[in-house]
Image (cartoon, rainbow, N blue to C red):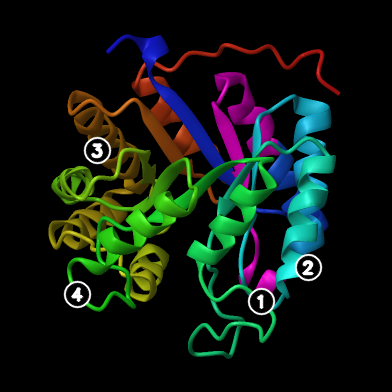
Amino acid sequence: MTQNALNVSFEFFPPQSLEASFRLWDSVRTLAPLAPSFVSVTYGAGGSTRQLTHEALGTLIKHYGLNVAGHLTCVNATREETLEIAKGYAEVGVKEIVALRGDPPKGQASFVPHPEGFSSSVELVEALAGLDLFHIRVGAYPDPHPEARDENSDIDMLKRKFDAGANSAITQYFYDVESFLRFRDRAEKAGIQGKIIPGILPIEDWEKTKRFSARCGAVLPTWMDDAFAKARRDDVEELLSISISTEICSELIDEGVEDLHFYTLNKPHMTRQICKALGVEIRQDLRNVA
């Protein structure tokens, strides 16, 4: 694969404080010169960052000229309210949406649909497709989703989302390339033709990653715990994290993957180093961007 054949994209989350705002815009200025195919902005649990997400989307489009995908969930909103949010995205220039069911609000053990809201991501995708305003991206799970009933559930759900009108999917992060490749093969066998983009999470904090992975179902190879313990002892944790993610990306590229989506956590420097190692060059000059 040539350098120019690799498409990268980045996920950011909206700031909830002045300090977080500086981190977001530092992240954007660090990664935007790599000319991502798109960037996405998350949507807090329970819709808690709804307005902040909207504001961040508008700024990314107006001041950085990026192709932006706004996250949208089914949580704590009626169908009408949710579609109005989508239309508001379109008004500020958003052409893509990452449509998700969404995590339950804090203190709520499981997802409970709003009485007048969408009950699943499939319903949300179908309604968004009816607007005919967006490229619709959805989630996919190479490692089983915590609520999956059996090994076929995640493939079945992904097919339903594509059948409802989704255009492409972004996976939960993973650290076993074979897990993604098996998932991709099963999706193809199930008749799923839309693009499935691997999600990459550079490990900024191993202990936090372990806790979050336990909640979301991402499988961590057993060797990584010992590796990070030794790296912590030798003060080379960041180097190890960059090496792991770069190796994962290289293996995926060797297997024909042309798109990679990085979960940046608004901490861009490891992602920038990984992209550099993969041969992704600066393609956009931000010196004249306001």
What type is the residue that disc 4 sits on?
Asp
Q: Amino acid at mark 2?
A: Glu
Give left or right: position of 56 versus 140. right
Callout 1–callout 3 Cβ contact below 8 Å? no
Q: Position of residue 109 (x, y in %)?
A: 49, 90
> 85 or 162: nearer the eye?
162
The quadrant of the rendering that contains the C terminus is top right
How much space separates mark 4 and mark 2, taking CA atoms? 33 Å
Tag 3 or tag 2, which sits nearer the N-term? 2
Choose top left, top right, bottom left or bottom right for residue 184: top left
Q: Which mark is residue 248?
A: 3
The percent coordinates of residue 249 (x first, y second) are 29, 33
- Residue matched to label 2: 81
**Residues shaded magenta:** 26-49
Question: What residue sits right under mark 4 in the picture?
Answer: 150
- Residue 42 inside the magenta-drawn segment: yes
Marked residue nearer the N-terminal end (4 or 1): 1
Contact flag, marks 4 and 3 (Cβ < 8 Å) = no
Instruction: Determine the residue positioned at 16% across, 46% down.
Output: 189
- Quadrant the N terminus occupies: top left
Helix, strand or loop at label 4? It is loop
Residue indicated by mark 1? 117
Which circle, 1 or 3, is nearer the viewer? Answer: 1
Percent from the top left, x then y, of residue 126?
A: 55, 57
Q: Is residue 247 magenta?
A: no
Give the label, 2 or 3, closer to the camera. Answer: 2
CA–CA distance between discs 1 and 2? 9 Å
The reply, left or right, for residue 236 in relation to residue 152 is right
Measured Cα–Cα span from mark 1 to mark 3: 38 Å
